Structure formats: C-alpha cells, structure tokens
Image (tube, rainbow, N blue to C red):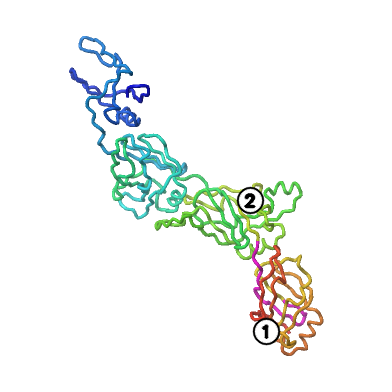
Amino acid sequence: HVGSSIEDWSLTGGQVSSAYSTILTVQLTAYDLDNIKRIVELATYTSSTYLRLSYKFVRDMNNNSIVAIAESEGMLVTQYTRDSIDPYLVSFSLDLSQELITLSFSETISQPSFQIRFLTFQSTANSDLYFITLTSYTSISQENSTLLTIQFDHDDLNVLKAITQLATSPNDTFLSHTSTLITDMSGNFITPILYKQAQQVESYIPDSVPPYLTEYNFDLNTGCFSLSFSETLNIYPTNLTSLVFQSFSNLTFAAYMGVVTSTLRLTGGNATYLPLNPPRAIASCHFDPSDKIQVCFNTDNLNTIKFDPILCQHNTSNDCFITFSTNAFVDSAGNQNIPISSDLGLQPTEFYADRTQPELYQFETMDMDTGRMFLIFNEPLNHNTLPALPTDKVRLQRFYRNINLTSVAESLLLSSGVVSLGLRGLRVIVNLTTDETNKLKVNDLLCTANSNCWVSIMSNTLFDPQYNGNLEVSVDNAFDARVFIP
C-alpha cells in the first residue's frame, strides 16, 4: 500500500538466483513468507502488493548501486499469483497440566477460521474406539501464525480425562481432523487427517495438578451434600472416612477462645456423580466426566448430625464446615486432592436445613410389666419438646384399622405420660400413667398380645431438632408392637 497507513515486512534473508541477468529471483525464507501471510492487508491481492528497496539491495556489473525505491513511491507488483497450496498440520503438543493444545502448521493460518468442533482426539492411529471430538475452548491465541494455542473447554477436558484409555501417554494420544478445521490466509482449507491415519502427539505433558474443592452444598432434607472440584474425579477409590464436618471453621482458634465445638468423621456413605449440565453422553468414558459428586450420609452419620445441637443445625451455614485429608479423592491421573485442614474448614455455598417431618419407623416394644412403650422414629427427635406427652394425641388400639373410636374396649387415648429419648433421639420411651396401665390390664381385648396392640399418632405430636412435627400415623394405618411383654 502507498499512502499514510502502510502494512509492510522487511525481508530477513532468502536464496537469490546466482545467474547474471536482468531478472533476479529471490526464494523467500519460511520465516519471511509466514510473516507476510500473517499481515492481513499485505500481499493478499495485486493492489496490496508493493515493493520498496534501498540502494544497498543490489549492484550492477560496474558496481553501481541500484536506484532506491522509497516507501512513498512503492512499486506495484506486475504479476501476482495467490497462494493455492493447502496448509497441513506439522505437529501438535498436549499439556494436560496447563490444559493446553498447541497446533503447529505448515504456514500461517487464519485464526478466525478455526472451528474446534472438527478436531478429534483418539487413542490409536487407525481407530476411533476411544475418542472425543472437542466442542469448545476456554481461550485461544489471537494472532494469525503457524502456531495455534488452545486452552481446553472445562467440560471437554473432563470428558477426555474420564476416558482412561485416551491421552494418558504419548502412546494413546492421536489427533484427526476434517478439512474444515481451519484455513490459511488465502482461504485454502487444511489437508485433513483421517481417523484411519491419525497423527501422534509430538510433545506430551501429563496431568500433575492435584484436584481441589471449589464449592460444596449441604442438604439435610436429602441427607446428602454435593462437592464441586476443579476437575473430574475417579470416585471409585474415594475415601469417605477422610471427610470431617465441624461446627467451627478454625478448630485451633476455637480451642484458644474456649469455644465449644463438635465434629463428625464419616464412617461411610455413598458417592455418586452429578451429571454435567447439559449432560454429555460419551460411550467410551470409563466413569462420569462430571466434576461434581454427591455424597449421601449413611443412616448413622445422618442421625448423628441431626441429633447434634451445634453441628449443621441452624438455618444458616455458620456451623457446618467440611475438611478432609489428602487421601480423600483422586483424579483420573491418580493425583490426590489438595487437603482442607481443620483450621480452614470450607463453608457451604448453599445450606438447606432440615424441613422433613419425622416419621414413626417401628412400634418397637410394649412392656406391660413396666407400663412403658418404645417407639422408633426415622430421625432423632428434640428433647426440648419433652418430657410430657401431649394429651389425647397418641392412641393404643385393638386393630390396625376400622376401630370403634368411642369404645373403651377397642382404643385408649393416652394423656400426659412422661416421655424420654434413647438411642440418640431415635427411640421415644413413653411411660404410661398408672391409670392408663390399670385400664389396659383390666381390658381383655386391648394390648394383651402383639395381635391386639397397635399405636396411632396424630401429626405434630413430637418434633425433631428443627421443630418439624411428626407425620400422622392414622387410626387406619396403625403400627403393631413388634415385641410384647405381658
């Protein structure tokens, strides 16, 4: 271009024809040629191709310097032939620690023309048994160049890592692509690499970065908590006994300040993957590519938390911190997680307090000898709502349904007997009053054996630690005494 705005490139070398002639041919270096192609407005057509040169460029046979061509008087090309040669992929490198793919091309390519959805990783040179076709990227180098550096899309990388026979070493890292992957600066499509002739990685760096927890959510209603990590995990060797919940974020500081704390180390549970959103159905994945897992408490741990008055009980997340050691989780490359110490407990992003009504699980025992009945609930109850049993809310009845509520022979409404808790709040011990015990003992039809001793309970008779009232056990769905002591 001749004018105020000039795009140009000064040659750095080249091979010059040795014959003495009025015609001088210069074979451009690859470096110069690639840089000329890189500049969008330079030498892309006849009207954008001008030449300038200094007097030092060449001499005639009498050692006279050539007449210089100034920048402002650039000479327009006489004959212009556009680039018609298809580019091709020279090599590629994969860095799973930095999450980068670097593609090296035979010439300068047009970065805006790149379409990652036509790029596929596969485990062998001649088969797509284990593969992933990429869908997106997080970032990409912005210049037109012979090199293109791509940072993986987070979900794509997790899918790649979940295929345990793909990209674990140079021996199972191959790449194929279609011709629509990218073009050069003249619009020539790249030479495709077919999946039957895939190209092996030149430089491979494995994943050596340990996974770390980014977020966790807690839900006492489902009895589960979710963990979001920096990458997908292999949950099958997960060590749930390394997980600890604590009521204060920094236990050392709490001890120094004299703050009463509570902790619970898991004794088990069940870990599952939470699916990607949107889901990715990849047949060759050996485990779910999600970076989110859900852990559900075992019954004992869940009830322990619900019965603990200062651990994960409040409507906020200020008493429910999680910690774990380095051997809790591993990623697909076997890197162990970064630990969370007991002095840096992580607070849940979302916390859902218990809003589930407790249910009667079993009428465990009717003991006529001591005048006591034992009820087992599915979760701990609140001792603050005891010791008096609400009047006329618990009924002993002859049958599990279809009873005559007005007949003293068929049912007995209990009054304000003394109530206590056992089995860490799961067992409710009802001490019948002397009058109630005597009424049962003189009744030949009610509570003389298992078969005629059933219990029903009105709703909101007993409450859990979050003051959720129990679900009703109606008179037509009563529970029978599993053990009867006459």
Q: Which residue is mark 1?
A: 450
Placement of 332 over or under 368, stated as above or below = above
The residue lying at 74 percent from left, 53 percent from top is: 260
- In terms of sequence position, does the residue under pointer 1 or pointer 2 come before the other? 2
Residue 370 picture location, percent across and down = 77, 80
Residue 399 picture location, percent across and down = 66, 85
Report if the CB atoms under discs 1 and 2 are less than 8 Å apart: no
The residue lying at 73 percent from left, 66 percent from top is: 382
Placement of 4 over or under 357, stated as above or below = above
Distance Cα–Cα, label 1 vs label 2: 49 Å
Placement of the N terminus among the 4 image quadrants: top left
Q: Which residues are magenta?
A: 354-373
- SS at circle 1: helix
The residue lying at 22 percent from left, 12 percent from top is: 60
- The count of marks equals 2
Placement of the C terminus among the 4 image quadrants: bottom right
Q: Which residue is mark 2?
A: 347
Residue 79 picture location, percent across and down = 22, 27
Amino acid under disc 2: Gln
